[in-house]
Image (cartoon, rainbow, N blue to C red):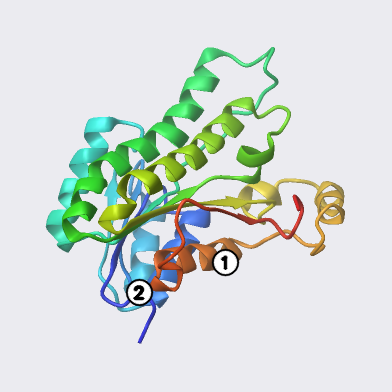
Amino acid sequence: MKLLEGKTAIITGAARGIGKSIAIRFAQEGCNIAFTDLAIDANGVATEKEIAALGVKVKGYASNAANFDDAHAVVDAIVKDFGRVDVLVNNAGITRDGLMMRMDEKQWDMVIGVNLKSAFNFTHALVPVMMKQKAGSIINMSSVVGVHGNAGQANYSASKAGMIGLAKSIAKEVGSRGIRANAIAPGFIETAMTEALTDEIRAEWAKQIPLRRGGTPEDVANTALYLASDLSAYVTGQVIQVDGGMNT
């Protein structure tokens, strides 16, 4: 029996990167996948095909996760297409880094809108569905900078700290209805973004990590799988740092 057999997950911002890795890992365990991205371009279509090859139902939806009405309309469409939703992964996110004294309002608003408001939008739309089912798992993708802060990332750090507060609050609000909410705080993960860094910078990062390596998207996906599955049936309101021990 696969861990997520017969379940359906919504994963936002999952046409690429960590979101895509989570979608593939879930599908490997029998989960049907509804994923969103700003546009389902060639990248999104390729992701859809890759997941479909694993033998599950999958559909990509074009959605501006930061728009309240858009998010609700997409959730309605997904519930109609799939029948139920067991797992929500609030993964959509962007960065617009800059020091506070140089950061403009647009940089702040964009990051808070995409990273934090999108999580509110999808959670708000899905909680009634999960309450009717009397079951559900909500996973917010936070970051170690949401736990510890980071110079030059006040907007991103604030949005990711907000994801933690949101998960903890939802866990308290709807735990009695069988719904769990947790957050994952990845550390230095080897992605397309970190590949752009020089070997020297990446080596410096590795020295600060007790496990002496950057994490992989699969490391994060495995933690998401645990939180999505019944293995974590008694885990809610928690933040799991997937960071190789860099912030212990």
Categorize mark 1 by other alpha carbons within 10 Å: few (<14), some (14-19), many (20+): some
Circle nearer the N terminus (2, 1): 2
Depicted 185 relative to depicted 214: above or below: above
Q: Who's the residue at 49% across and 38% down the image?
A: 165
Task: Identify which amino acid the numbered label 2 is placed on.
Answer: Leu
* Residue type highlighted by circle 1: Glu
In the rendered image, is residue 194 in sight?
yes
| Residue sitting at x 62%, y 16% | 103
- Which-is-in-front pick, marks 2 and 1? 2
State the residue lying farthest toward the front. 176
- In the rendered image, the residue lying farthest to the bottom is 1
Q: Which residue does the numbered mark 2 point to in the structure image? A: 4
Residue drawn at point x = 70 percent, y = 20 percent: 99
Q: Work out whether 5 lies above or below 82.
A: below
Residue 143 point in image, percent of width and height:
60, 45
Q: Between residue 162 and residue 54, name the one nearer to us.
A: 162
Residue 118 sits in quarter = top left
> Quick check: can you spot residue 92?
no
Q: Residue at x 61, y 52 (%)?
A: 186
Residue 70, how many percent across, how many down? Answer: 24, 35
Q: Which label belongs to residue 218?
A: 1
Q: Whole-percent x and y of residue 126?
A: 25, 47
User: Going by the picture, which residue comes out furthest to the left?
Assistant: 80
Tell me if residue 216 comes above or below residue 140 in the rendering: below
Left or right of 65 in this view: 147:
right
Of the numbered discs in the image, which one, if any, rests on residue 95?
none
Neighbor class of circle 2 (other Cα within 10 Å; few <14, some 14-19, many 20+) is many
Where is residue 151 drawn, in percent x and y?
73, 29
Quadrant of residue 234 within the rendered picture: bottom left
Could you say whether the residue bearing mark 1 is in a helix, strand or loop? Answer: helix
Q: Secondary structure at mark 2?
A: loop
Please identify the quarter of the rendering in which residue 29 is found.
Answer: bottom left
